[in-house]
Image (cartoon, grey):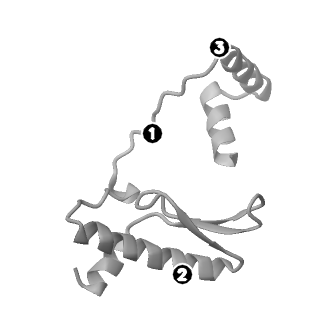
Amino acid sequence: MTRKQIKAQAARYTKFVEWSDEDDCFIGRCPEIMAGGVHGNDEAKVYAELCQAVEEMIETIHADGHELPKPLAVKKFSGKFVLRLEPALHRRLAAKALAAGESLNSFCADALVKA
């Protein structure tokens, strides 16, 4: 694989950088391609380091003869998933949704967006 091909492949994977109060620094991750992450105090530098780490991981996977995982961007999602809860929590969520004048689905979707 050429450097250009590796960069193009790496660009397809989801990367995110967020502040961690626990670690007191920015943490950069690409969960589709690597278990760990990178960290630092400068958000832009962490993102650049993350991009480099993803490219290196792609090189390693390719060199080892393994197949790359599919990027989330190309996976098909139905928009539905089953969430198993304790019945008491299900009841509390239904009550909160009712009190908010929303369906349980809308209430939970909003809560997940905020999480």
Circle 2 packing at 10 Å, graded few (<14), some (14-19), many (20+), is few
User: What crowding class fits label 3: few (fewer than 14 Cα within 10 Å), some (14-19), or many (20 or more)?
Assistant: few
Q: Amino acid at mark 2?
A: Ala
Q: Is residue 7 above or below residue 26?
A: below
Residue 63: x %, y % from top left? 24, 72
Q: Residue at x 42, y 71 (%)?
A: 54
Pointer 1: what residue? 79
* Residue found 65% across the figure and 26% down from its top: 103
Q: Is residue 48 left or right of residue 64?
A: right
Disc number for residue 30: none
State which tag comes first along the sequence, 3 or 1.
Answer: 1
Between tags 3 and 2, which lies in front? 2
Mark 1, mark 2: which one is toward the viewer?
Answer: 2
Helix, strand or loop under label 1:
loop
Find the residue positioned furthest to the front: 64
Q: Are marks 1 and 2 in contact (CB under 8 Å)?
A: no
Left or right of 17 on screen, residue 65: left
The location of residue 1, given as percent across then percent down, is: 22, 79
What is the distance, in whole Å, between disc 3 and disc 2 at their CAs? 45 Å
Between circles 3 and 1, the one closer to the viewer is: 3
Q: Are marks 3 and 2 in contact (CB under 8 Å)?
A: no
Q: Residue at x 24, y 66 (%)?
A: 64
Which circle marks residue 87 in the picture? 3
Which sits in the foreground, 35 or 75?
35
In primary-sequence order, the first of circles 1 and 2 is: 2
